């Protein structure tokens, strides 16, 4: 694994039920976290598909202790007893905002959000000691794929100037068809698999990365209905701007309508 002060990965977060069911994906997250801790990662910047704002700004959480948000409903009672407490890297959060201003991108600080389950379920398994700082960042329903990529580049610049050992996590499922869910069927329906494979195929060739920004017009996009409309992946591409390749390091189905994937940029 290449040693750098910025590592980048796109990860599904699955269902909150992995907190009690464990399984292959939870085990994978644990091992992935151990790998990053080995190289000295001490700060996480994370974009969850559940933090999508409805205005033309990007937001960075600047609270000293981001709220742990349990934004899931109708699940077993024991799932609401889990939580993930962490500290923010407020200085890095401020630097991201400043770098946005320099390139004319509206990036604002806020304390009104925190780490929702699209972020903290991943962190719960990857960094169980809770000894990493976490900077949550938003996406925007009113900004373009290109602006999301630019936001990723802003994050990259801020991290590189900070000299911190940072892991950026773009969270989300490429296939997210809740209407097709069949509990106990750990596979992905055909249209979802095709979309996932297409995304991976594009990412494996950096010259094609721009194609990701136009996938909204692809019939397979509508079949897979990716979580958060790929906004967190667009941000991830910007953060990974100087990486040379992307590699799928985990793939599985969940309940037929969902896919679990991990793509590492190196």
Image: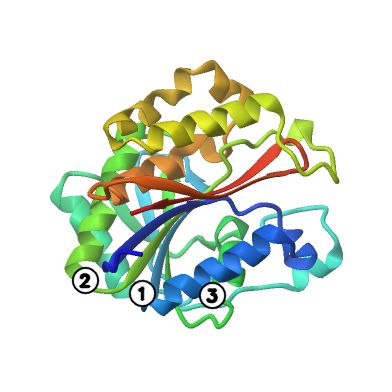
Residue 89 circle label: 1
In the image, residue 193 above or below residue 29: above
Left-right relation of 67 to 74 = left
Q: Residue at x 44, y 59 (%)?
A: 46
Residue 146 circle label: none
Is residue 243 something that shows in the picture? yes
Q: Mark 3 or mark 1, which is nearer to you?
A: 3
Q: CA distance from mark 3 to mark 1?
A: 16 Å
* Foreground residue among 234 and 207: 207
Residue 106 appears at what percent x and percent y? 27, 46
**Quarter of the N terminus within the rendering:** bottom left
Disc 3: which residue: 127
Helix, strand or loop for disc 2? helix
Disc 2: which residue: 162
Is residue 140 something that shows in the picture? no
Q: CA distance from mark 3 to mark 2?
A: 22 Å
Helix, strand or loop for disc 3? loop
Left-right relation of 10 to 75 = left
Left-right relation of 261 to 215 = right
**Quarter of the C terminus within the rendering:** bottom left
Which color mode does the image show?
rainbow
Q: Mark 2 or mark 1, which is nearer to you?
A: 2
């Amino acid at each position: 694994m290449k040693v750098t002060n910025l590592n980048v990965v796109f990860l599904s977060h699955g269902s909150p039920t992995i907190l009690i069911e464990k399984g292959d994906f939870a085990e994978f997250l644990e091992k992935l976290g151990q790998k990053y801790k080995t190289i000295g990662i001490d700060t996480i910047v994370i974009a969850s598909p559940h933090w999508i704002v409805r205005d033309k700004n990007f937001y960075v959480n600047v609270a000293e202790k981001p709220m742990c948000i349990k934004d899931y409903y109708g699940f077993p009672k024991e799932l609401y007893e889990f939580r993930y407490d962490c500290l923010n890297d407020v200085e890095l959060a401020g630097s991201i905002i400043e770098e946005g201003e320099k390139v004319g991108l509206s990036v604002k600080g806020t304390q009104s959000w925190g780490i929702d389950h699209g972020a903290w379920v991943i962190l719960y398994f990857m960094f169980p000691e809770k000894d990493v700082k976490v900077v949550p960042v938003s996406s925007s329903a009113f900004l373009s794929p290109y602006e999301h990529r630019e936001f990723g580049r802003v994050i990259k610049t801020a991290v590189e100037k900070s000299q911190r050992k940072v892991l950026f996590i773009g969270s989300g499922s490429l296939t997210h068809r809740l209407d097709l869910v069949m509990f106990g069927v750990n596979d992905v329906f055909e249209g979802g698999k095709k979309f996932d494979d297409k995304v991976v195929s594009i990412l494996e060739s950096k010259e094609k990365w721009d194609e990701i920004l136009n996938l909204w017009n692809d019939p397979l996009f509508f079949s897979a209905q990716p979580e958060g409309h790929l906004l967190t992946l667009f941000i991830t591409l910007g953060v990974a701007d100087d990486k040379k390749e992307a590699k799928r390091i985990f793939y599985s189905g969940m309940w037929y309508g969902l896919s679990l994937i991990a793509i590492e940029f190196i």
